[in-house]
Amino acid sequence: MVTHTKPAQEGGPEDNAPHILIVDDDSRIRDLLGRYLHDHGFRVTMAIDAESARAHMRSLAFDLIVLDVMMPKESGIDFAKSLRVDNQIPILMLTARAEPEQRIEGLETGVDDYLAKPFDPRELLLRISNILKRGAKAAPSGEIRMGNFIFHVSRGELQRDGETVRLTERERELLRYFARRPGTPVSRHELAKGSDKGAVEMGGERAVDVQINRLRRKIENDPANPVYLQTVRGKGYILYSE
């Protein structure tokens, strides 16, 4: 098993800086990303495959995983599936541009976001920062109630009976978009393409359906018969609040 942890350097990240685990079998990409994130204030640990990533996770706590899809032995998709059994650490998945099915599968697995290769490292940095910011608590400014669920709109936090329910970045943005216009139908096309200002760009109508089904499993007592996030035939979806 080969692993590599980037050591702290003088003037490098603070001890309490977010800790990122990069999992990629391509040493060139792995090292480039490691240096770039380290230079931008993150603590970084690198793993060559899922096995070495698990070894790191047994002894270290991470704030986010940057995970490549195509890896030997165990793919990024399979690794993400195994993590989601009992671990809700944020995951940013790296995919090849020609692999739309893997993006859909990744969303179904529960990854927070994906980035297509090749990509600008600045976009990776932005997506990581957005995921981490959305996971942090902020002062509330408005909330909606759905039975025993409360969604705090500004900080993107969903609670059930006082306990926080983990949301992925896309689930959070989708729920926030609906919450700002409760009782108003939103088309699948609008959500898929981000055609309306403030809409969540999901990348395709099938991806929207995947996200809606996942969100229903978190806010509905019976996802097969939704009470709050309902389908509007011929129009799209609508969120009802109390």
Image: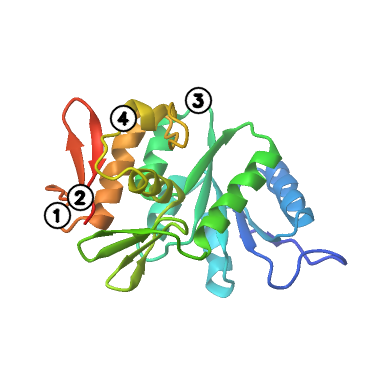
Render colour scheme: rainbow
Residue placed under numbered mark 2 in the picture: 228
The residue at 25%/31% (across/down) is 236
Structural distance between the alpha carbons of marks 4 and 1? 22 Å
Q: Residue furthest right?
A: 10
Where is residue 101 drawn, in percent x and y? 39, 31
Circle 2 SS class: loop
Q: Looking at this view, is 5 or 103 the one in front?
A: 103
Residue placed under numbered mark 3 in the picture: 98
Structural distance between the alpha carbons of marks 2 and 1? 10 Å
Does any portion of residue 29 appear in the rendered image?
yes
Where is residue 44 drawn, in percent x and y? 69, 60
The residue at 28%/45% (across/down) is 182
Q: Which mark is residue 188?
A: 4
Residue placed under numbered mark 1 in the picture: 222
Circle 4 SS class: helix
Amino acid carrying label 2: it is: Tyr
Horizontal relation, residue 198 to residue 190: left or right: right
Q: Looking at this view, is 7 or 160 the one in front?
A: 160
The label nearer to you, 4 versus 2, is: 2
Horizontal relation, residue 116 to residue 176: left or right: right
Q: Looking at this view, is 214 or 237 the one in front?
A: 237
Q: Residues within 10 Å of mark 1 (few under 14, many from 20)?
A: few
Circle 1 SS class: loop
Q: Residues within 10 Å of mark 4 (few under 14, many from 20)?
A: many
Amino acid carrying label 1: it is: Asp
Q: Say which label, 4 or 2, has the lower sequence index.
A: 4
Circle 3 SS class: loop
Amino acid carrying label 4: it is: Arg
The answer to whether the residues at label 4 and label 2 have Cβ atoms under 8 Å apart is no
The label nearer to you, 3 versus 4, is: 4
The label nearer to you, 3 versus 1, is: 1
